[in-house]
Amino acid sequence: MGLFRGFPLISCSGALSRIILRAALIVTACCSAEAASNNAVAVTSVLELFTSQGCSSCPPADALLATLARKPDVIAVSFPVDYWDYIGWKDTLAAPAFAARQKAYAAAHGEQHVYTPEIVVNGLAGVVGSDRQEIEEAVRASKGREGALTLPMRLSRSNGAIVIEVGEGEGGPAEVVALRVVRSKAVHIGRGENAGRSVTYINVVRAIDKLGDWTGSTATFRLPETGEEGEGYVVLLQKGPLEKPGVILGAAKTAGL
């Protein structure tokens, strides 16, 4: 699995990682509106997978995320990162903002490195993205912790917009963050550790934006429809600024994600 230490210097997964890890003496880590969402199902976990087309340890995590995403009480998204691009294959879905989010989580959690595949659970803990048992244990451990997923959120459609309603509660202030996602994206990887493989990524984040602030009172926010088939939104109510993300207090998604 790919390990990224100290935030600018990288080691990687597979055979190359073993060489670099030995050379650098690095401790290894595992490289009245129409309803817009299924509001009847309470969200119990938000899973953010940080993955890379250049990491040979990532395809099992990508497949596991697709399985977990089928559960109606789970919100699962993929954040493709770009810090393995130097190995020989430029990730076609990655963006610098996604690696920055992972590094911000690591700093908030007191970690000295980032790695792929990693799943961050409810904004609170990072675990190996291909280890289902570890993921499920992290979900159980985060239940109710620091108010995780205790605040109600509802999405609906009205006049060409997504309407986000956030309920009243404790835990503010927090930010309302919108993730624009593509439901599914198949990629044939031409070079690097996964050369020759075709991998399907689900709920791939394409943009992340702050919609506004929530202070504890009932609030409403609006988003324009994406206008693109196969796209949707995940909306998070999250402590801390985007540069220092914290616990996810509430979450909702548009139908089909």
Image (cartoon, grey):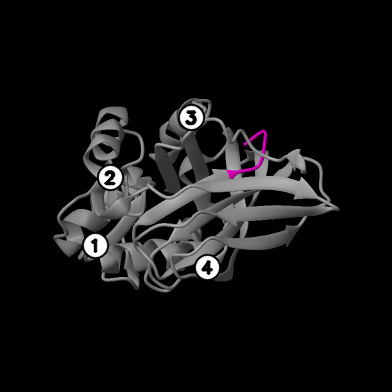
Residue, disc 3: 63
Q: Which residue is mark 1?
A: 109
165 lies left or right of 250: right
In the image: residue 48, left or right of residue 138 = right
Q: Residues within 10 Å of mark 4 (few under 14, many from 20)?
A: some
- Secondary structure under tag 4 reads helix
Q: Residue at x 29, y 50 (%)?
A: 126
Residue 255: in magenta span: yes
Which is nearer the N-term, disc 4 or disc 3?
A: 3
Under mark 1, the amino acid is His
Where is 1 relative to 211, above or below? Answer: above
Circle 3 SS class: helix
Separation of disc 2 and disc 1 at Cα?
A: 18 Å
Ranked by sequence position, the earlier of labels 2 and 3 is: 3
Mark 1 or mark 4, whichever is nearer to me: 1
Tag 2 residue: 144
Residue 4 lies, with reference to residue 230, above or below; the image says below
Number of residues whose C-alpha sits closer than 10 Å to that of mark 3, classed few (under 14), some (14–19) or many (20 or more): some
Q: Earlier in the sequence, mark 2 or mark 1?
A: 1
- CA separation, marks 4 and 3? 23 Å
Q: CA distance from mark 1 to mark 3?
A: 26 Å
SS at mark 1 in the image: loop
Q: Residue at x 32, y 71 (%)?
A: 7
Report which residue position mark 4 lands on: 97
Q: CA distance from mark 1 to mark 4?
A: 18 Å
Q: Are marks 1 and 4 in contact (CB under 8 Å)?
A: no
Q: Looking at the image, is mark 1 or mark 3 nearer the viewer?
A: 1
Query: Between disc 1 and disc 3, whose residue precedes?
Result: 3
Q: Secondary structure at mark 2?
A: loop
